[in-house]
C-alpha cells in the first residue's frame, strides 16, 4: 500500500493512571447504573404482577403492582450496585480490556492493532456527573463495539487519545 | 488516500450500457410496485371528483422513467492507476473514489433478462457497510469482464502475451450429479415452503387460510373415518403422507440447487478466486484469498452418508447475511479430501488438519445438563395436555446424554502462532479455522458453573462472521489454560498489523 501520511509533531503522550491494573469506575456513577438497572427490572415485574396478581389473589390490581414495583426497584438497584462495582478497565501494551458481570463474568480484550475507531458518548445525566461512555469499535461481528459506560470524563479522554494515537501509529507501519 | 489524478488517471470516462435505464426502471418498479398498485386500486374505487387519481400511477411511471434515463446520462466512471472513480447525480453531484486496495469483492450478476440483453450488473464491495461501494446497473458483458479484470490486475493494461495463455483449470467444478446431491443434502425446499406458507398467510385473510386448512383436515379425517380403518392403517397412512411431504420438499431442494448451482466453477486466477454458478441467472463473484476472514467446514449427517462436506468462508464485505450474491461457499459440496486439499492449497501457510487438542471428556455432563431443563419443560407441557403419557418425553434424556458424550468426545481446538481452529458437533460436525492475524477481539467468559468448576470459555471474534455459523469459541477450558491462551493471543495480536 502506498499511502502518504502527513507528518506532524507527535503530541506528548498523555499519562495513564497506573497502567496494567484493573481500574474501577468512579463511584459517583453507581447511582446512575443502579437506577437504570432498577427501572429495567421493576418495569416488567410490575406489569406482570398487575396482570397476574388479581387472578391469583382477591386484591385490587394496584396492590400487587405497587409491591412488585418496590421489590423490583430494591432488587434491580442492588444488582445494579453490585454489577457497577464489578465493571473495570485496563490499558496496557497489549490493548484495551474491559471486564464486567457479577454472576456471568466476561473479560473483553481489544488489541491496540485492532481498534478501528472510537466514540465518546455523553448523555445529559452523564454530563452532569462528569462521566462519559467510551465505545471502542472493531471490525469484528460479535464484538463490533465494546462499550464502557460511566467512565470519569478525564479517564475517557485520556483513553481515547491514547488509543487513537496508537491506531494512527499502527496505520503508518 | 491518493490524490484524484492518481485515482482517476487519464483513461476516458466510461458510461453504463445504453439499456441500463431499463434495468434501473425495473429495479425501481419492483420497489414501488406495491404503492403503485395501491394507488391504482384506490383510484379505481373512488369516483367523482377524484378521477385524476387514476392517472397517478401513470404519472409515477413517467417520473421513474425520467429518473432512470437521467441516471444513465449522469453516471460515468473511469479507471485509473490506483482505483476507480465514479461520478453520478445531476443536481446533487457525487464523486466517489475507490482505491483498488479497498475493493474486497467484485460481483457480476446476470439475471435471465440481463443475459437476453447481453449485459451484467457489477458490484464493487469494500469491507463493512450495508451497501456496496459502487453498483453499476448495468454494463455490457465484455465491459463488465474488463472492469473485473482491471480490479484484479490493479488497473494494469492487459499483458499481450498473457491474454493468449490458457485459463487455469478450475479448482473445483460441480457435475450435475454433484448438484443433485447438494440439493438432496440441503434443506432449501423447506425454506421455500415456509416462505410460501408465510406469504399465503399474509396475502390472504388469516381466517380464510385457517378455515381452508381446517376444512382440508376435516375432510381428510372424514374420508379416513368413512373407510373404517384400524389405527395401524391410519398410522401407515400418516407415515406415507409424511414421506410424500418430505420427498416433495427434497425434490424442490434439488430443483432449486440445480437452478442456483448449475455449472458451478471455482477458478483461481492470479490473485483472485472466482466462483461462477447459476442456470438461469448467472452469478460471478471473486475474492482475494488474503481477504478471507475465516474458514468453515460443515458435515451434516446427510453429507456423511454421501461422503461429502461443504467448505464455506467469511468475507468482511457488508450487506445482508443471506444475500445470494455473497461469496460464502467455496465448495458447496465436495469430498472431504477435496475440501482439505482446497484449504491447504489456498492457505499454504496454515496447517490443516492441525493437531487437535481434545477437551476434558468429563465436560460431557455440562452439555447434557444444558439440555435437561428444556426436556423437562417439554415433558411438563405434554403432561398438562395428555396426562401421564407426556412423561414419555423424558425418554429423550438417555439419548441426549449419549449425544452429549459423543459431542464432548469430538470437541477440540488447536492454537498455534498462525492459526486458531475449533471443531464441534456430532451428528452435524463442523470445523472453524481462522488466521491469528484475522482475529479482532478476545473475550473470556465465565458462567457461575464455570467459576464453580474452575473453567472458562474463550471467544475469538472475526470480521464477517455470520450469526448462524458457530462462533470461534473454546469451551470448558481449565481457567489457568484459558487465561494463558487469552494473554498469549492478546500479546501476539498487539504486535501484528491487521491485514485485511
Image (cartoon, helix red, strand yellow):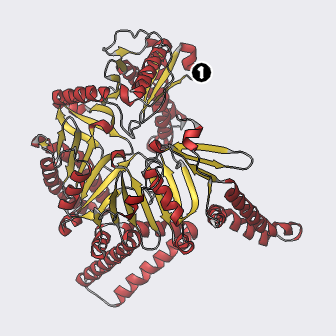
Q: At x 49% / y 13%, what residue is drawn?
A: A9
According to the picture, the residue beneath numbered tag 1 turns out to be A124
Residue B263: horizontal and vertical position, in percent?
36, 71
The picture places residue B209, in percent across and down from the top left corner, at 52, 72
The residue positioned 35% from the left and 86% from the top of the image is B225
Mark 1 is surrounded, within 10 Å at the Cα level, by few (under 14), some (14 to 19) or many (20 or more) other residues, namely: few
Q: Residue furthest bottom?
A: B227
Q: Position of residue A12 (x, y in %)?
A: 45, 9
Chain letter of disc 1? Answer: A
Vertical arrangement, residue B450 with respect to residue B67, above or below: above
Which is nearer the eye, B31 or B129? Answer: B129
Question: Is B161 on the left-hand or right-hand side of B22?
Answer: left
The quadrant where residue A123 appears: top right
Q: Quadrant of the C terminus of chain B?
A: top left
Name the element at disc 1. helix
Give the farthest residue toward the front: B161
Q: Residue B134: percent from the left, percent from the top?
A: 55, 50
Near-viewer residue (B197 or A133): A133
Residue B386 picture quarter: bottom left
Q: Residue at x 43, y 12 (%)?
A: A27
Can residue B269 be seen at all in this image of the molecule? yes
Query: Does residue A4 lie above or below B305 as drawn?
Result: above
Query: Can residue B467 be seen in this snapshot?
Result: no
Amino acid at each position: 500500500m502506498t499511502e502518504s501520511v502527513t507528518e506532524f509533531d507527535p503530541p506528548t503522550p498523555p499519562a495513564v493512571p497506573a497502567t496494567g491494573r484493573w481500574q474501577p469506575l468512579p463511584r459517583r456513577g453507581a447511582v446512575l447504573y443502579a437506577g437504570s438497572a432498577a427501572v429495567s427490572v421493576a418495569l416488567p415485574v410490575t406489569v406482570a404482577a398487575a396482570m397476574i396478581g388479581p387472578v391469583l389473589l382477591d386484591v385490587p390490581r394496584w396492590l400487587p403492582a405497587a409491591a412488585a414495583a418496590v421489590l423490583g426497584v430494591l432488587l434491580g438497584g442492588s444488582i445494579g450496585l453490585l454489577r457497577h462495582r464489578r465493571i473495570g478497565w485496563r490499558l496496557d501494551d497489549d490493548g484495551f480490556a474491559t471486564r464486567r458481570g457479577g454472576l456471568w463474568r466476561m473479560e473483553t480484550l481489544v488489541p491496540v492493532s485492532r481498534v478501528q475507531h472510537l466514540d465518546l458518548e455523553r448523555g445529559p445525566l452523564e454530563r452532569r456527573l462528569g462521566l462519559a461512555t467510551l465505545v471502542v469499535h472493531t471490525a469484528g461481528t460479535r464484538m463490533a463495539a465494546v462499550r464502557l459506560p460511566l467512565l470519569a470524563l478525564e479517564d475517557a479522554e485520556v483513553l481515547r487519545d491514547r488509543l487513537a494515537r496508537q491506531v494512527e501509529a499502527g496505520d503508518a507501519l | 488516500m491518493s490524490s484524484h489524478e492518481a485515482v482517476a488517471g487519464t483513461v476516458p470516462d466510461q458510461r453504463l450500457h445504453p439499456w441500463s435505464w431499463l434495468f434501473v426502471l425495473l429495479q425501481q418498479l419492483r420497489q414501488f410496485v406495491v404503492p403503485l398498485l395501491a394507488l391504482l386500486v384506490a383510484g379505481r374505487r373512488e369516483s367523482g371528483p377524484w378521477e385524476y387519481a387514476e392517472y397517478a400511477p401513470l404519472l409515477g411511471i413517467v417520473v421513474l422513467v425520467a429518473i432512470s434515463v437521467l441516471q444513465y446520462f449522469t453516471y460515468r466512471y473511469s479507471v485509473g492507476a490506483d482505483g476507480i472513480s465514479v461520478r453520478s447525480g445531476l443536481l446533487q453531484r457525487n464523486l466517489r473514489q475507490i482505491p483498488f486496495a479497498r475493493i474486497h469483492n467484485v460481483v457480476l450478476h446476470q439475471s435471465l433478462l440481463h443475459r437476453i440483453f447481453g449485459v451484467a450488473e457489477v458490484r464493487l464491495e469494500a469491507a463493512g457497510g450495508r451497501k456496496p461501494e459502487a453498483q453499476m446497473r448495468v454494463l455490457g458483458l465484455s465491459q463488465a469482464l474488463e472492469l473485473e479484470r482491471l480490479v484484479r490486475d490493479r488497473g494494469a493494461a492487459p499483458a499481450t502475451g498473457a491474454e493468449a495463455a490458457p485459463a487455469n483449470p478450475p479448482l473445483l467444478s460441480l457435475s450435475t450429479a454433484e448438484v443433485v446431491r447438494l440439493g438432496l443434502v440441503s434443506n432449501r425446499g423447506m425454506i421455500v415452503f415456509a416462505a410460501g406458507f408465510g406469504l399465503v398467510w399474509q396475502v390472504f385473510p388469516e381466517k380464510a387460510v385457517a378455515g381452508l386448512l381446517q376444512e382440508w383436515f376435516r375432510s381428510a379425517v372424514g374420508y379416513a373415518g368413512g373407510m373404517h380403518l384400524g389405527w395401524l392403517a391410519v398410522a401407515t397412512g400418516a407415515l406415507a403422507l409424511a414421506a410424500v411431504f418430505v420427498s416433495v420438499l427434497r425434490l424442490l431442494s434439488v430443483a432449486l440447487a440445480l437452478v442456483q448451482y448449475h455449472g458451478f466453477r471455482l477458478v483461481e486466477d492470479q490473485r483472485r478466486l472466482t466462483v461462477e454458478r447459476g442456470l438461469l441467472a448467472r452469478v460471478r463473484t471473486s475474492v482475494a484469498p488474503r481477504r478471507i476472514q475465516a474458514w468453515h467446514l460443515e458435515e451434516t449427517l446427510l453429507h456423511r452418508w454421501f461422503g461429502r462436506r461443504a467448505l464455506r468462508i467469511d468475507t468482511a464485505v457488508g450487506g445482508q447475511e443471506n444475500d445470494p450474491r455473497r461469496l460464502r461457499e467455496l465448495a458447496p459440496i465436495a469430498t472431504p479430501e477435496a475440501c482439505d486439499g482446497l484449504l491447504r492449497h489456498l492457505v499454504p501457510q496454515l496447517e490443516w488438519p492441525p493437531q487437535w487438542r481434545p477437551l476434558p471428556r468429563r465436560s460431557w455432563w455440562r452439555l447434557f445438563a444444558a439440555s435437561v431443563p428444556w426436556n423437562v419443560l417439554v415433558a411438563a407441557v405434554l403432561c398438562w395436555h395428555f396426562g401421564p403419557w407426556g412423561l414419555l418425553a423424558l425418554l429423550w434424556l438417555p439419548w441426549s446424554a449419549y449425544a452429549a458424550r459423543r459431542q464432548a468426545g469430538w470437541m477440540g481446538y488447536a492454537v498455534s502462532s498462525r492459526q486458531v481452529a475449533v471443531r464441534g458437533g456430532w451428528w452435524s460436525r463442523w470445523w472453524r479455522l481462522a488466521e491469528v492475524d484475522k482475529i479482532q477481539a478476545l473475550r473470556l467468559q465465565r458462567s457461575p458453573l464455570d467459576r464453580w468448576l474452575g473453567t472458562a470459555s474463550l471467544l475469538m471474534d472475526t470480521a464477517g462472521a455470520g450469526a448462524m455459523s458457530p462462533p470461534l469459541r473454546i469451551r470448558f477450558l481449565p481457567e489457568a489454560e484459558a487465561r494463558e491462551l487469552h494473554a498469549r493471543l492478546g500479546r501476539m495480536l498487539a504486535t501484528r498489523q491487521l491485514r485485511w
